[in-house]
Image: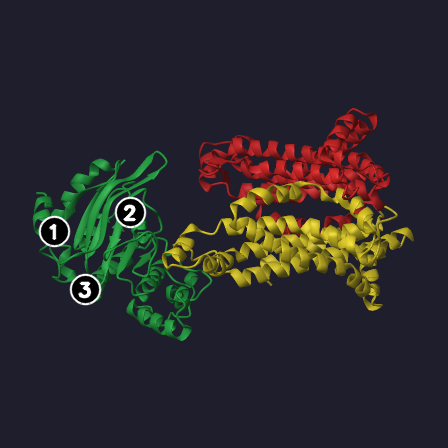
Chain colours: A yellow, B red, C green
Amino acid sequence: MNRSLALKLLSAAIVFGAWEIAGRVPVSYAFPTFLESMHALVVMTFDGSIFTAYAETLKPLVIGVAISAFFGIIIGLWVGLSSRFEWLFSPIFVVMQAAPLAALIPILVMAYGIGLTSKVFVVCIMAMPVIVLNTASAVRNTPASIKDMGKSFMATDRDIILKIIIPAASPVIFSGLRLGISAGFIGAILSELKITPTGVGDIITYSRSIADYPSMYAAIFSIIVLAVLFLNLLERTENYLFEGNNRGYVSD
Amino acid sequence: MTVYGYRLPGMSSLLLWALLWEIVGRTGWTFFIPPLSDVFITLFDVIGTPAFLKAMYETAYAFFAGVFFAVIIGIPVGILIGKSRLLDELILPWVNIFLSAPLTALVPVLMVLFGFGMKSIIITTTLFAIWIIILNSRAGVKQINRSLVDMARSFGASPVDAFFKIYFWAALPEILGGVRIGVVRAVKGVIIGQLLISIVGFGALFELYSNNFMMEHFWAVLIVLFAVAFTMSEFLAYLERRVSYYAASR
Amino acid sequence: MSQTNDAFTKAVPVEGDSAVSVRNVSKNYGPVEALKNLSLEFPRGQLTSLLGPSGCGKTTLLKIIAGLLEPTSGEIEIDGKIITSPGPDRAFVFQDFALLPWASVIRNVAFGLELRGVAKSEREAIAEKYIKNVGLSGFEKAYPHELSGGMRQRVGLARALSVDAQVLLLDEPFSAVDEQNRRKFQEDMLELVRQENKTFIFVTHSIEEAVYVSDQIAILLPRPSRVSEIIRPQSFRGTGIENIRRSPEYLDIVDEIWASLRNYVE
């Protein structure tokens, strides 16, 4: 067992151990121990309730991310390629990126009700800015050298975009997608806690209301674990797909 | 982009969008979008009112307190794990986890443990901001040139001197970068906190106005919030630029 | 002992015609005059170097000839035609290799042909031939990041050769390559010029490199950019690569060029 893995396990043991102790003290009546929460998690897994919950929660997330990715990349490409388009649309996305868009949730609810539509909207407004800005930045930062190379071999504009710019921009676009999914996750959870409880958000609010704290903590723990695992997986895929890309442009 | 040879400034298209907003507002297409001019009139009306000032105060208090804790805990922790390999391997995984995790999910826990008041909101704000501050402070420390460290030791600098006269400044550009992103996240944190935990401050105003369909007021307050967040971010960017003159040649 | 007078009486026009003619080319970037009224002839089938300190406009001139930049005034004529944009008659080799990092060696070499719509099997066959030519057999499926700097430039060279252009433009092709590989490249360059019936235009800032590989050296000086001398080494051309660097004429020319250029080093 190498040192890095051992230390990670030690670190986890320390934190979960502290959780367990804090629960036994108890730090607060509302603070269950680590083991109690894990027990609740196991129960929810075996009776299937956690799977139905996630199916519900993931709906707006998947739909929202798909829409954001599709439109976000297209808009991002356009913004990156056309300086007119960039002047027109880039400030909007920069503002959206920095602003606390969560404030718009009540409006969305008023406009679109408390169903799937507003939740998808929330995911979209959280995820799209970072996808657009990353894509645009990647396109704009394509090394001039390989674009020149394409031109010197008389590539058409279409060829340059399809065969040079887009492949060159892919790593950063992918990384933007990852950040977008991460932001979309926040949007999905937020909409479940704020708009209307369904899915995992429902487990959290319901357990809290009946003071079943182990279940509440279990649900939250599962969200964090899943989000982290999934995003880590994406990062590994990114590295696997694009490991050669950032080297080999010039003499390193 | 250039028009007749004149370069248009970066964000100037916002003026065009503002104009579009005004026009759409006047057509009355949807009551959610009132004319921008009405929004601005309401803005100036509302700014002086006690309700607004109270909301401003509550939000600002939570925000600055949250950022304060994020900074005084985050920077030292970041520096510590940047310098100690052991602590780095123990703590960094958690920093990365919480950086990418949907922190919103943790808010119910905070509500349950710390109640429905200002305390929870401040903690939410701190949590949103702290991870990136830790990460950037760590990066700032890690990239300090070995030669600077050797130089400090060869001239017999005490640990305190070494820290305040050398390491702090060498790591400052990255630290400032982290604080700037942290501040933007903190604004999101304080609003999300207010929306979920207890309806105070700007969160309360948003609820109030949207429930009563006072759209001009809603947008007015939203614009104020965006403007404040933007100003703070730009101020920090300015500070970053002030130290960046030496950043590239470290 | 300047060869300029010798060069002008003996060299123009010595071996047949000019493949490329540069006539009164100027290039301005706002108030900055990168090139001013520059004229130069490049003899067919030979290697001409553009040699000079940084800022003398040699890469700018090369890119104008390639059609990647437009001159502010003046014209470039190739084989009787005035050119304004890239064409099938010219191929460019880049200083930083400009390879597609996500494509294999064979795809990179065939890229010029791919852009021209040549069918896959045909272009890969041509590419394989030139991969062998530059000594990269066996690396067809490798990726740029798996290759050393020297190998990457061979890919760039093979790509330029594959499109069978009449004029080959090389922009400091060996400056990003280590010293040993660089020497090998210079030797290979001599062989290449001898074998291929193309006109080579070669930008470099290395005096020794220029004198080693060139049939003709054009010395450019900065501010404003102008051709100050044209030198045609005689005695050691074609005597075999081992003997060149010790030839008295080689050493004399290198010293002479350095003497005139050293004032321009900042």
Q: Residues within 10 Å of mark 2 (few under 14, many from 20)?
A: many
Instruction: Report the front residue among A154 and C205.
Output: A154
Tell me which label, 1 or 2, sits earlier in the chain. Answer: 1
Q: Secondary structure at mark 3?
A: helix
Dots 2 and 3: beta carbons under 8 Å? no
User: What amino acid does circle 3 point to?
Assistant: Arg
Chain designation of label 1? C
Quadrant, the C terminus of chain C: top left
- Residue furthest to the top: B48
Q: Which mark is residue C194?
A: 3
Chain designation of label 3? C
Chain designation of label 2? C
Q: Secondary structure at mark 2?
A: helix
Dots 1 and 3: beta carbons under 8 Å? no
Kindly report which numbered mark, 2 or 3, lies closer to the viewer in this rendering: 2
In percent of the image, x 26 and y 42: which residue is there?
Answer: C53
User: What amino acid does circle 1 point to?
Assistant: Val
Q: Looking at the picture, do discs 1 and 3 lie on one chain? A: yes
In percent of the image, x 41 and y 72: which residue is there?
Answer: C119
How far is the residue under mark 1 from the one under mark 3?
A: 21 Å
**Residue C265 falls in which quadrant of the image?**
top left
How far is the residue under mark 1 from the one under mark 2?
A: 21 Å
Q: Which mark is residue C116?
A: none
User: What amino acid does circle 2 point to?
Assistant: Leu
Residue, disc 1: C12
Tell me which label, 2 or 3, sits earlier in the chain. Answer: 2
Q: Residues within 10 Å of mark 1 (few under 14, many from 20)?
A: some
Residue, disc 2: C61
Dots 1 and 2: beta carbons under 8 Å? no
Residue B148 versus residue A35 in the image, above or below: above
How far is the residue under mark 2 from the one under mark 3?
A: 25 Å
